[in-house]
Every structure is written in C-alpha cells, then in structure tokens.
Amino acid sequence: MRLFAIRPRSPRRPLLALVFLVCALASLPAARPAAQQAQAIEVTSKVIVGAKPNYDLASQWTAAKVGRLVFDTSVTPRWLESGDRFWYAFQSRDGRKFYLVDPLKKTKAPLFDHAKLAATLTSITLQPYDAQHLPFTTVKFVKQDTAFQFDVTVPRDAQIVKPVKPATPPLLAAGTKKDEPEPQQQQTQQGGRGQGAAGATPAAPPRPRILHFEYELASGALDLLDDDYREPRPPRWAQLSPDKKTVLFARNHNLFMMDADSWALAQKKADDPKIVEVQLTKDGEDHYSYARTVQAATQIDQQLQDDQQAQAEQESTDKNARVPAVTAIWAKDSRRFSIVRRDERKVEDLWVIDSLAKPRPKLETYRYAMPGEANVPQSELSVFDRETKAMTTVKADKFKDQTVSVATRPARAGAGGRGGGGGVGGGAATDAPPPQWLSDAPDKLYFMRTSRDLKRVDVCLATPDTGEVKVLVEERLNTYIETKPLRLANDGQDLIFWSERTGWGHFYRYDAATGALKNPITSGEYVTTGIDGVDDKLKTLYFTAVGREAAEDPYYAHVYRVNLDGTGLKLLNPGDASHAASLAESNSYFVDTSSRIDTVPVSALYDTAGTLITKLETPDISALTEAGFKFPEPFKVKADDGITDLYGVMFKPFDFDPAKKYPVILYVYPGPQTESVTKTFNPREQNISLAQFGFVVIEVGNRGGAPLRSKWYHNYGYGNLRDYGLADKKAAVEQLARRFAWLDINRVGIWGHSGGGFMSAAALLVYPDFFKVAFSESGNHENNIYNNTWSEKHDGLKEVVDKDGKVTFEYDIETNSEIAKNLKGHLMLVHGDIDNNVHPANTFRLVDALIKANKRFDMLVIPGSRHSFGAAGAYVSWLRGDYFCKWLLGQADESVDIPELNREREQAGDKAPVRR
C-alpha cells in the first residue's frame, strides 16, 4: 500500500523493460511446473504488450490547448426587452464578434463597427486594441434597447482621455453624417477616485480600475459614464421585493424588513442611525433559521460553494450583523411572501479539517443527514403579509419527514439584453427579479409536498391568509417519483403537471382550481424533458423531448409544439442530432443549436412554425483538423440482458493503427440522475487527451442510468445501487472487442469521479478478473454515509408503521468495503481532504477494509481540495494518464517533474498554482 505518494516509477524505455523481463524469466526455478511458467509469462505479458505511451500526443490535446484551436461552438441568444430581437457574441479564431439579429426583418448585422469602436477605446484608454481583441465580453442593453453599456478594465495608474460630450443630444443631430470627425477630447492625468494630486504617490490599489461606457446604437456615439466604476450590486444580505419597495434580511436567525427609504440609506452607510428596521420573527435560532445558509444542500456531483465572501460572512464574529439573504418567494404584487424554513436542530454534525488554513488547520462543522437516520431536516412553510406584518403557517403537514417546495414562475429563458446572462458574453444579471409565486393571483400559493420515501407527491393550493390547503393532484408510485416544475396556462385556468405514471414522462392538463384532470397533453413511448414556452392566446405548449424520432439516438433532444388539448403535435427542429433551443418570450421564434459528437454544430434561427429564418454560426474547426483531430465514434450495443439498447461513444488515439492492439479504458458515471456519455460536439472532452497516450476510451450507458429513457430503464438499479450498472459495462466492452480486433479485452481499465469513482472501484471488486486497473476519484464508496436524499431516493427506503401508528424508516445498502477482499487489480483512490459533498470517510472506510484484507493499492489525498479538486484538477488528470500507462501499457514517465504541466503553466504565464 502506498499512501499519499503515487508517482509511477516504471521505466519509460521499452527496451530496458524487455531486458528486465527476459532476465526475470530466465531466473525462474527449473523445478517450477511448465504450466505455472506459462501462466506467469501470460500474466506479465498483459502488462507490457502494446506501444510506448505517447506522452507528447496526449499533451497536445489537453483542454487548455484545444481551447486555443476552437472557441465558441454554439450561439447563446440574449433576447431584448423590446420585440423579438436578440444579440449574441461568438468567438472564433478571428476574435469575438457581437451581432444583433432581428427575426422580423430576417437580418443579422454586427452590433457595432468593431474596428471603429476598438480605435475609439484606444484613443480614450491609451491602451492598444483592435477589432479582434476588444477588451469586453458582454454588454447590457439600456434605454428601451436603444443603447448598451459595457466595462473595460485598465491599470490603476492608466491615463484616460475623457471625451467631451457634444452640445447636441447623444443621438445624431439633423443633417449630421456618421462619418464626421470624433468629438473633441481632453486628457486627464489623474488616476481613479481618491487619488491625490499629480505627482503624489498613491497607496497600493486594492482593485483594478474599471471604466464604464455607454454606446448609442443609432449614432455610434461612445460615452464614458464612470471612471473607476463599481457595478451596483445589492449586498448579499438583502433580498428586494418585485416592486423594489421592501428589503428582507436576517439577523440572529430572525427575519427583518426595511422600506425603500431605509434601503437607500443602507446602501450608502450600512449602520446609518436613520435606518428603520422592522423585526418580523423572534423564534429563529441556530439550525432553525430564517436566513439562507451559506452551505447548500449536498447532492451528488454538485460542486459545493467555495465562495470566499460567503465563507467570510459565515465566519463573521459579529452576531448582530446582517447575514446572507433569506430564501423568500414573493407574490407578484409584492404584498406577501413565503419562506420554507428548515429545522436541522436534531440533525447531527459532520466535520472536515482544512489542513491548509492559515495560520492553523481549521475544523469545519456542518449539519449532514445520512440515509436511514431518524433525524433529518424538517420543512415548514409560512406566509408573511408585508402590510400587516402577520405570519401564517401553511397547514402543509401530511407525511413524516416530508419536504415542501413552493412552485415559482419560470425565469425568462435566454433573457440577457438588459442584465447580461451566463454563457458567452454573459454574466449574472444585476436587476433580476426575486423568485415569485407561480400564480399571478395574490391569493393562490401552489406548492408540492413529497414523502421521505419519495413514493407520494401532492400538488397543493394554499390560501395565504388562512393557511388552508387543498390537494389538487395526488401522485403515487412504488418507486421514487420524479417531479418537474409546475406551469400555469390558459390565463391561469390550467395547471400543467409532469408525470411518469405510464412509464414515460409526459405532461398532463388539470383544472388549476379544482384539480380535475382535463387531458393528457403528450403521450407515447418517449420522454418530455421540459417546457420551453406556453402561448395562452393560441393555447399551445412548446416543449423539449427525447426518444420520439425513430432511428435516432434516444438521447437526442428536439423541440415540439402541441395544443393544450393534446392535438396538433409537431416537430419544430428536425435533424439527426441533439438540439438545444432558446425560445423568445413572444413564443414566435427560437434559436436552435444542432450538435452531435461526430460532426460540427450548427446554430440557426427558426420561427415556431418550424421554418428556418437564417443560419447564425458554424464553428470553424480547420485548426483542429490541421492539428490532427478526428471525431469520436458513436456506437450501439446490447445490454447484458441481450435486449436493451445501449448507446456509447469511442475515443481513439489520433495516431490509431488498426494493426495494433489497444487497451480499453471505460469512463463511467452510473447515474441514476444522469448518464455521462458525451452526445454533442466537445473537442475539449478530457477523454480525448487520455486516449492519446495509446488507449481506446469508451463511454457507454447502462440500465439504471439516465432518466431520459423509460421509467423501467431509469429504475433498473433501484434497490441495488452498487452493482446494477457493471454487467452492462462489461457486456459492452465484450461486444466491442468481438466487433473490433484491435481492442484488447485482456487489458481493461476504468475510471470515474464521484459516483464514477464509486463505480470504478466496485468494478474491480465485482469483476476482478475482467477489470484490471481502476482510477477512482472522490468516490461515494459507502452510500450509507452519503447524504440521505440521494441515497434513500435511488436505493430505496422502507417506511414502517407500527400498530400504534408510529412511523419509522428502514434502510440498507451494499458498500464497496464489503467486497474489498476481492481486489486483484491495481486500484488508485483519490480524494480531497475537505470534500463536504462526498465526505473523505467514504474513501477512508474502503482503505480500512483493504488494509484489513492485506491488499496493496495506491492512494492520493489532496490537501485543501473540495469535491472537484479545483486547482489540483490538472495534476490529477495527468496522474490518471500515468497510472493507466504504467499498468495497461507497462511503462510510464519515471521523472519527478511533470514537464507537460510545467509547460502549460509557463505558456499561461502562471507562476504557481492557485489554491481554490
């Protein structure tokens, strides 16, 4: 066993390795039976058969290097507030370009003259720019979409030439030509705010200097609005009402509010004595708080918050300070709001130790419910009246240990004309409204409650003033129930509910007041995955679904239109590929990106009749192909039952030679909430680089994987969460090896992260004669100590009611530790020491079992690392390649340094890794 050490020491020189092998075989005792000698030769040969690991080729195809060959691969539209126009930014090897698209006019034009704007910015900032290298990535539309604003960062001591505003209004005066000279400019020598007179030596700046500009679309005029700009952002402790007249916050775990006047004072001076605060509750306490906790509820493969500001606030010693904002959901009219408060007072603590904390290692303590435990968080739903300050408790209780969630209005998809947005050219919107109740009516609060065993879900309608509850829909299954957000249609008269009651996920229309079922909206052997839009005037639903189109990969998504009565179903974006769409708020147009792993994506604009308006972008991959890139290859095989179709993808080395034999590496993630099989174009895929060492890397689904198939497929592993996917992975490799002679079925490796780390180790223990090497990262090897919500859902929880009506829960699950004695191959275990998602104890308990079973294995603990490894990710990735080279190819780099990573750091200009 090698703890915390793991540099492979095998020689990289194959000739020397062969000499050592011959000498070793020659020294075998003569009395040893011939059969044993043959067996020893065979086993040893499995390690060294194959070509020399191609470190150089692997280093050429890291995500960082591919990112310099191809840039954006899809269009993310930012719909404007006025009409159906949108802007987007798209980066290629020619630089980042901004475009404005008008679907009605069927036009696509540059948002501005890129060369002219670059020249103007150069003359103002005295920093050199050109059309290919503009100093901003996003814009924010203002003034009814007649102008946009953006920021430029410059050095603190930069000289700025501020343009003199013309005497005429910003728009072009009558008769003025666009090619007239630029307005006169004046030069300023001073730095930012607070800097002294010229020649004075300023203090070291705490931040860079930001210039805030506004560009008029009609005139092309550029105005510097603010020098040393700070974007207005509400403090983390504040939540504004939709009408912006009220601010909610928490202190000492209780709920407070202030009006707009006090809010204005607080933004200038947080402790202004003129601020009037109104306390709404007095029963808040630690772990039963009205405040939003900094630590999010843990779910598998979810990166937990590492926000330094959030941690600083959480660690504040000022108990009277305002704390992170409450999680209120408002009525549309801002008169009422609701809060789901979680009672975690009885939930037990869990800990991690941050060994790298300064000046001393630090103990982190948090509440964490494990599966089957008697004490789990309790949900409590309350409604507050802003005018009367009254609190009403909603009578939501029904199931023991139930969870409650308030139904909310859908966020506008792709909106970002005013607030930015995520993705290319994106950024978080600063003026986004808070979450709001689903219904426009102020007296209707829709919510869902779910039993702990997830076999019962109620859709309920509450009366805010009284707390009375009416059940509209009762959903029941004998396995866990999946849910999707509720939606209202037909001016609030219809409630759209998603259900798998037929074994396939579909939408159903209910009366929003009575709960009477009107009709199924969709049906058939396919799965609807989400609502894109509802047109009340046309009584039409726009939705995304998978698996409906014959002869296609069932994971390929498409957009459809259907009438609310279930008639008139129509496919809007055909084509044998996966389609991602963004629908305009008017439901008149949508932007579609068609993509699959073995071809170049295409982004285009359609109307909702399915008519192509115009093509937008297709990424240029010429630099990729010149460098030797080859598309991965999709395939289809049968599951271990010989009936179920499984879909996968194969990554070959770009110097592939069909005359050679290649080891196989499976990249796995078992689900059941997702299947990690790449379906769309992604040249930065990490398995591309791994394959270049000299492997064929395979991703393939398994029964019990993604919920994008039937309920039967998705629930296959229910009650057997350790072994359910392994037989299918093994069967897939066996079929491919029969199909392709260049696959070596005697050299099979497997790797994965989180659930994939769990599955990788399980593979070596369940099929020790088939899987030879596993690289297991952050694995939840002991699901009996993982979080209760995921483990109880996917493995199953039994609710037991005794003769007195007392409810208890029974839980049991198989773990990797139980079969540690089966280990035969080479196992690497990697875990971050402050992983508060999958606790390090998951790996340590497996380590303990391996030690007790007298097994050799490898292990790496990454200090200061959370679940995803952060800055250490590149190191782990290269170590992964080393490990498979050593044990599947028989040789690996023996040097102490990793030159490939050092070169990447030098090229990026990094001096040292930054701790996440």
Image: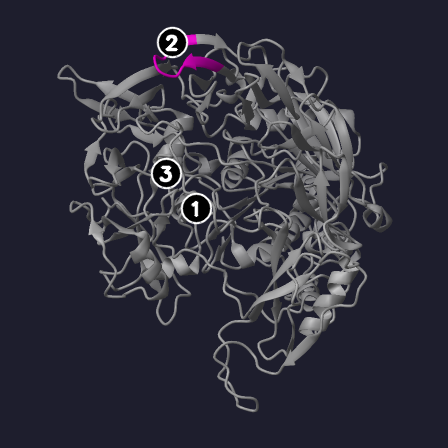
Q: Is residue 798 above or below residue 597?
A: above
Sequence order check, earlier mark of 2 and 3: 2
Magenta stretch: give its range. Answer: 508-517
Q: Disc 1 designates what residue?
A: 843
Query: Label 1 to label 2, Cα distance in Å?
Result: 50 Å
Q: Determine the residue positioned at 66% across, 15% down.
A: 570
Residue 23 location, x and y as percent?
73, 54
Q: Amino acid at mark 2?
A: Ala
User: Circle 3 is placed at which residue position?
Assistant: 787
| Secondary structure under the numbered disc 3 in the rendered image | loop
Depicted 582 relative to depicted 420: above or below: above
- Nearer the observer, disc 1 or disc 3? 3
Residue at 42 percent across and 39 percent down: it is 299
**Would you say residue 647 is visible in this rendering?**
yes
Q: Nearer the viewer, mark 2 or mark 3?
A: 2
Local packing at callout 2 (Cα closer than 10 Å; few below 14, some 14-19, many 20+) is some
User: Which residue is denoted by mark 2 in the rendering?
Assistant: 516
Q: Amino acid at mark 3?
A: Asn
Q: Can see residue 363?
A: no
| Mark 1 residue type | Thr
CB contact under 8 Å: marks 1 and 2: no
- Report if residue 831 lies within the magenta region: no
Q: Nearer the viewer, residue 801 or 462?
A: 462
Judged by depth in the image, the label closer to the viewer, 1 or 2, is 2
The total number of labels drawn is: 3
SS at mark 2 in the image: loop
- Viewer-proximal residue, 484 or 245? 245
* Separation of residues labelled 2 and 3 (CA atoms): 37 Å
Q: Earlier in the sequence, mark 1 or mark 3?
A: 3
